Amino acid sequence: MEIRRKLSYQFILIVALILLLSFISIYISVSSFRKETFYARLESRALSVAQLLIDVDEINAELLRKIEKSSSSGLPYEQISIFDYHNELIYTSDEKNGIIFDTAQINEVRLKNELRIKERNFEILGLFYKSKYDRFVVFIGARDVFGLEKLSNLRLILLIVFFISLIIVLFAGLFYSDRALSPIIKVMGQVDKIGVSNLNQRVDEGNGKDEIARLASTFNEMLERIESAFKVQKNFISNASHELRTPLTIITGQLEIVLLNEREPQEYKTVIQSVLEDIRNLNKISDRLLMLAQTSSEVAKINFSAVRVDDLLWLVTNEIVKRKPEYKVSITLNEDLDDENMLTISGSEQLLKTAFSNLIENACKYSPAEKKVVVALKNDSESLQISFKDNGIGIPDEDIEMIFQPFYRGRNSLEYSGSGIGLSLAERIVKIHSGQLKVNSKMGEGSEFILIFPLLHPSKL
Ligand code: ADP
């Protein structure tokens, strides 16, 4: 059900309950007030008639009937019966149609002093009356025609007011819930119109103060994040396809040129070697892209195990030096690193290998003079620190913030081969190992990349 209708119905229910309770209490109090005043009138009338008959010697039943007929008491259909102490009827105002009272009722009046009976629309009051010499029971009955009519009028009015109020409340509820929800509906309409093609659009934040404005601003913040993620994604795809297309274009060009004429076998060999080099490069780029995608999700954490960092660094170094013998890698361990637990972290060997080899290769690549990197391991009680220090070209201050973004290449490194994926990959790998990656660098003097990993304590092994 729509919130608008739900609110209105709940509102109606609450108002209906309040009205019902107040109308019922009004009706009950008016009705009991009518009853009490009517019985009070019956009592005063009964007493005055009894007094006349019993205490005034000159008045007998016959005379009293005549007096009663000629004077109006204001009590409609009034009937009075008086019984003496033998329960003998000594007076009745209506000899033909008078209400008959039985002995039990008369005795009950004697016992309780007062009795109220309802019979044939008559409200009857039985009273115990004591005179100087005797004790009597007086019954007086009448119909409260006016009082009951007023009461039924009141009932009708209350019913009409009740239903009219409910109708008014229903429309008022719909109107106000409409007004209250219209800003939300407006926001919904605006959000509905935002799609991939117009992600730069924002929702109207209205007065900027109330809850709806907060909702709109939350939407806008979310749109901001989606838009920037979308931009990053778009750039990533275009950069990735550019990185893959360049070597492919070079390969195609080389092969086309070589096919134009008949060549010497040596020439074919040279071209094939060059194409092979390009394909290896292409392979490396696609491997790194794949790894970049893998490290973007938590799934990469699933294959974590205990990894000896020093062993892994030696392995990586051997592989690199085998491929590029001109690279010099020196690994130093702090003296107090004598316990193997201080060199063990929880991680993925494959991913850590990639991160280490990117950092070692970068350090050697960007120090063209000596092509050397010093890898130093230090520790404290909680973490292991690995630094990769070179005396190379350094990184311009303006680039430091950007070098961890995929495909970003420093402005002083464009003459070196590379695709700008290595560092961003290394940073993600460190992040999923709950580590930190810091960089200190000075243009022309060299760079130092520091990795800090939490240690895998013996208790966790
Ligand atoms: P690539 O080396 O393929 O360009 P990376 O992501 O590994 O991509 O590095 C990004 C950029 O960071 C490099 O283009 C370079 O400008 C800078 N950089 C990385 N390591 C070093 C280093 N050791 N010395 C100087 N600059 C570096």
Image: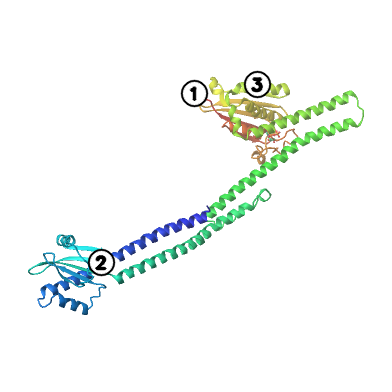
Q: Are marks 1 and 2 in contact (CB under 8 Å)?
A: no
Residue 360 vertical placement versus 240 (above, below): above
Compared with 374, 126 (above or below) is below
Quarter-wise, where is residue 208 in the image? bottom right
Q: Amino acid at mark 1?
A: Ser
Q: Is residue 24 left or right of residue 116?
A: right
Q: Secondary structure at mark 2?
A: strand
Res 366 visible: no
Q: Is residue 443 left or right of residue 6?
A: right
Q: Amino acid at mark 3?
A: Leu
Distance (Cα) linking label 2 and label 3? 112 Å
Q: Are marks 2 and 3 in contact (CB under 8 Å)?
A: no
Numbered label attached to residue 315: 3
Q: Nearer the viewer, mark 3 or mark 1?
A: 1
Residue drawn at (78%, 36%) of the image: 246
Q: Residues within 10 Å of mark 3 (few under 14, many from 20)?
A: few
Relative image position of residue 234 (x, y in whole percent)? 69, 43
Q: Which mark is residue 459?
A: 1
- Please say if the residues under marks 3 and 1 sit with CB atoms less than 8 Å apart: no
- Across and down, in percent, residue 339 comes to 53, 20
Return the x and y of residue 403 as percentages of the image width and height: 66, 37
Which sits in the foreground, 311 or 349?
349
